[in-house]
Every structure is written in C-alpha cells, then in structure tokens.
Image (tube, rainbow, N blue to C red):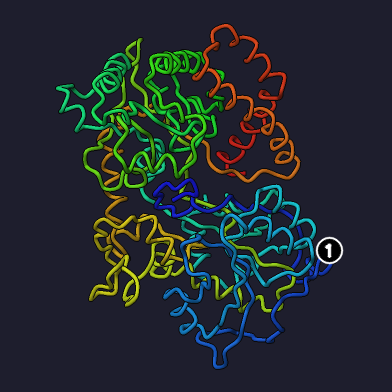
Amino acid sequence: MKKTKKVSYLVTTALAASLLVAGCSHSSSSSASANGAKGTNSSPNYALKNVKFPLQKKVTLKFLTQSSPIAPKNPNDKLIWKRYEKDTNVHIDWTNYTWDQFGDKRNLELASGDFPDAIFQAGLSDNDILRYAKQGVIIPVEDLINKDMPNLKKVLDSHPEYKRLITASDGHIYSFPWIEELGTGKEAIQALDDIPWINKKWLDQLGLKMPTTTDELEKVLLAFKEKAPAGADTVPMSFMINHGGEDPAMLLGAFGMGDNDDHYMVKEDQKVVYTANQPGYEKGIEWLHKLQTEGLIDKEAFTQDWNTYVAKGKNERYGLYFTWDRANITGNNEDYVPLPPLKGPDGQINVPRTNGYGFDRGRMVITSANQNLELTAKWIDKAYEPIQSVQNNWGTYGDKKQQNIFELTSNGSLKHLPLGTTSPWDLRQKTNVDGPLAVLNEYYGTVTTKPDDAAWRLNILHSIYVPYMKATYNYPPLFLDKDNQDQLTQLESVVKPLVERKKAEWILKGGIESQWNDYVKTLDKDGLSKILSIKQQAYDKFNTGK
C-alpha cells in the first residue's frame, strides 16, 4: 500500500520514502565517534557478545518509528511485537508518531543530538540520509550484515541486485531494506499502478459495449453524462491529477509512449527518456482536454483530496476512475471492472509501464548512539527470517482481538485467509509492523500463499494489460552518489512541478498546442537534459554491475 491509500502489497509504498546513505568508513562504532555525532538517548551498553535469542535476561533498546493513525499507539500492543519480545527477550521502548507528524518529529530529534538506538520505518529522503551518514548520525552496517545477520546476508547473496541497490558509492551500506517480490519484470505486480475501473453495471443498463478505442470511450462517457445513471450525482470520469495510481496517465498510452508517476521511461535501446516532452504526450493531453470541455471529467479532479475521492466512489457516482485496487475507492463492488487498454487514433495500443519496485532501500537505520550493535543487528536480522518477514509485511495469525490475516497450517506455513468485506489496507495497518524484511518469489507455495487481493490483481495485469505493455525495461531505484543526488534533486524541484502544473492546466483550460514548443524549450533550459544524463549514467553503471 502506499500512503496515497493504494492497496499495495507493498504495504508501503504506504509509508515513506527511501533512506539512502553514504558516509563513514572503518567499523560502525569507530567511524561514528570520529565524526563527533554521538547521541545521548541510547540504551545502556549491555556488553553482550555472541548474542543468542532468547536472552537470559531481558534488555531494552530504544527505537523511533512511525505508524498509521488507525494502528495501536503503542506498537508493543501488536501481537507480532509481543511474540517478537518473547522470542528475543528484548523489549523495545518505542517513540511512535503517526505518519503526518513523524517527519518533523524525527528531524527535530536528530537535530537535537538526542538519538534513539535505531530508527524503524525511517522515511528519510536520499539527501537526508546522505547528509546524516556524512555527519555520523547513522552508521555503516555492512560489517554487521556479514558477521551477525545470516538471514539478510543470504537474501543479498542470492539476489545480488539488492545488494547493489543498497550499497552507496563509497562501498558502504547504511540502511536495511524492505523487499517484497510479487512477480518479476513486466509480470510484477508493480508494473501498472493506475488501473482504470469502469462501471460495468452502467454499461449494461445503457446497452453499451465495453469501449476498445479512445473514441468509443468518449461516446460511453457522453452516454453516462446524458443519461445519468446516478442522477444528478453522476460523474462520468474522475481522477486525482498527479497522484500516482489515481492519475489518468495510463490512458495516454493510446497516443504514444504514455506517462507514469515520475515521468521516466526506458526505451528498447535502454535509453532513458522523459515522457512529458514526447509528441504522443501532447496529443493525449489534447484529448483529455476535449473530454473536459464536454463535461465528462469531474470538476474536482484537479483539487480533491483522498477522502473526497473515496467518498464519491463509495456512493457509486463514478462511471470511470483510477486506482491500484478498486477496493480502495468503491470497496468490493463487482460493478466496477478493469477497462482494457484502448486503441488510439493511430491504431496504437500501449500500456505505459511504471518504475515501481517492491523495494525500499531505507526501512531502518542504526544511529551512532547505539552501544549494542551486535544485539541490534541480530534483532533486525530476525525480521529477515522468511516466516517472520511474511508476518511483518502483512499481519499475523492467532489474534484473539483482531481479525487475522493468516492461519498457521499444520506444516508451519502461513495461509492467507479470505477477508470478506474488510479492507486489506485497513487490516494490515492495524496488525502488521512493516519495516525491514524480505518476501521473495520463492516463498510463495512454501512459506506462504499469495494474498487473495494480490493474486486477483496479478491475474488482471497478466490477462488484460501486460500483453499490451511494450516496455521491456523500467528504471530501477538506483543509489546515486551525493553530488549527483544533490544536483538531481535541485533540477527535479524545478522541472517536475512545472510539468505537473502544466499537465493539470492544459487538461482543465487547454492551450497545449500553442504552448508546446515553448514548454519543451523551457524544460531543456531548466535542466531536463542534465537530469537525463545523470539518470542514464547511473542506469548504465548499474547494468554493467560496476
């Protein structure tokens, strides 16, 4: 899931951004001390060596974290953490903030020098982590991984691409990743974010066929408007502009390369390009503006927040809308079905591929205040045990107070339970713990089953969209060095807001035809060519394994 409320089986993507880091050398403790960033809020030094769980005597570590507003305020009230403490005899003294507060609170604590032992669900930007690593606030952990973390080491050894993705340009690893595989390549569940969901009930009531072209969709939306199946509340098409899975970018594939949420795509010759300056993009935006002038697009599509978007969906006002999983917007309402890819004016059918990965580089970091590195590393490594990772990611079994995600089978594997009308997103927030973990493709059928909602979504992608997905490659979440990351952040802070502001403006008010040439020139002037150069160099380096 994402914070945008998408039912991601990446229950993340619900959370925050990656924490990417570069910095110190030598051992974790010596390099941190050398940089003079020793914190003051850590647990006492227990001087534990050759740690084995459960400990003979209970000890405490202090962690900073974030969680959903609907989750227990004290993380230790979750059954997963209760079992974890019993298995390890390590008590975690959590400082927990809700998502909306966490970023500011975390930054204040780190600025004050009052560090916890570690930050769980750290949610730092790449620039933040690079900065904190350089300052010695967080420490390199590759020695801990090699010496004290056999579960994570096994994952990285068997899947070396992940080790490359978490290794900074100086050769150090500064954070612990979250990995969730559900298919690979174009077959992965993240390959398409913004599925269009159309009201099949309305089609049937009005005697309309499922549209297969952009012209046919326009006629269907006009029929929705003119015959108003939901009365005055009828909304032919709605979306949330520039909002990931709720944006209508997928429709632009009928006009060319299409678009996705970060606007980067990789061509068949493995050249990185920007979607929002391609000729097909211009034609697609023109078409969306035409729909707008005909009154077919929700007037609130350019301003509405998540709650407004969902409320109208729950009331079945939409003829067509966009999101990762319809359960997020219209519940388990089978009247809404996937709209197949549309053929454009030139006969093209293309499903734009996203750059989504079931991967987050920085789910947890250890601070320089930590005096119990072996203990902390082994506590974290337990999260990479296959059976533990599965529970941390989705939820657990045997809860007497909460609905359960799983049942524990007689052979010790976990079987996903049907959730009925319960939102998977809501239940996972209440019961899972997320954080650093690894759920690999090879776990399905051995350690766990696939969630019903994930299996259902994968079937939709594979049967309806993947056959029309032209892109062989997508852009991975690469770990740039600090200079390139700083430059990229600075340039993107100018380019992306311009692109997304003009996208909304052109759909709403028109004008793309007369403004296009100047817009393309402005993107180049603002640094798009340099952005693409940085992206290309990093992509080429990653592909060569250097």
Q: Nearer the viewer, residue 453 or 153?
A: 453
- Left or right: 357, with 221 as reference point: right
The image quarter containing residue 44 is bottom right
Q: Residue at x 69, y 48 (%)?
A: 169
User: Does 275 appear above or below 450?
Assistant: above
How many marks do you count on the picture?
A: 1
Whole-percent x, y for residue 320 in the image = 32, 30
Q: Residue at x 33, y 26 (%)?
A: 236
Whole-percent x, y for residue 367 in the image = 70, 67
Whole-percent x, y for residue 94 in the image = 59, 73
User: Does 293 appear above or below 396?
Assistant: above
Read off the residue under disc 1. Answer: 35
Q: Residues within 10 Å of mark 1 (few under 14, many from 20)?
A: some
Residue furthest to the bottom: 56
**Quadrant of the frame with the C terminus:** top right
Q: Residue at x 58, y 84 (%)?
A: 51
User: Does 451 appear above or below 238?
Assistant: below
Q: Nearer the viewer, residue 169 or 363?
A: 363
Q: Nearer the viewer, residue 329 or 76?
A: 329
Whole-percent x, y for residue 96 in the image = 59, 67
Residue furthest to the top: 514
Residue furthest to the front: 232
User: Does 90 appear above or below 269?
Assistant: below
- Left or right: 444, with 239 as reference point: left
Label 1 element class? loop
Q: Amino acid at mark 1?
A: Asn
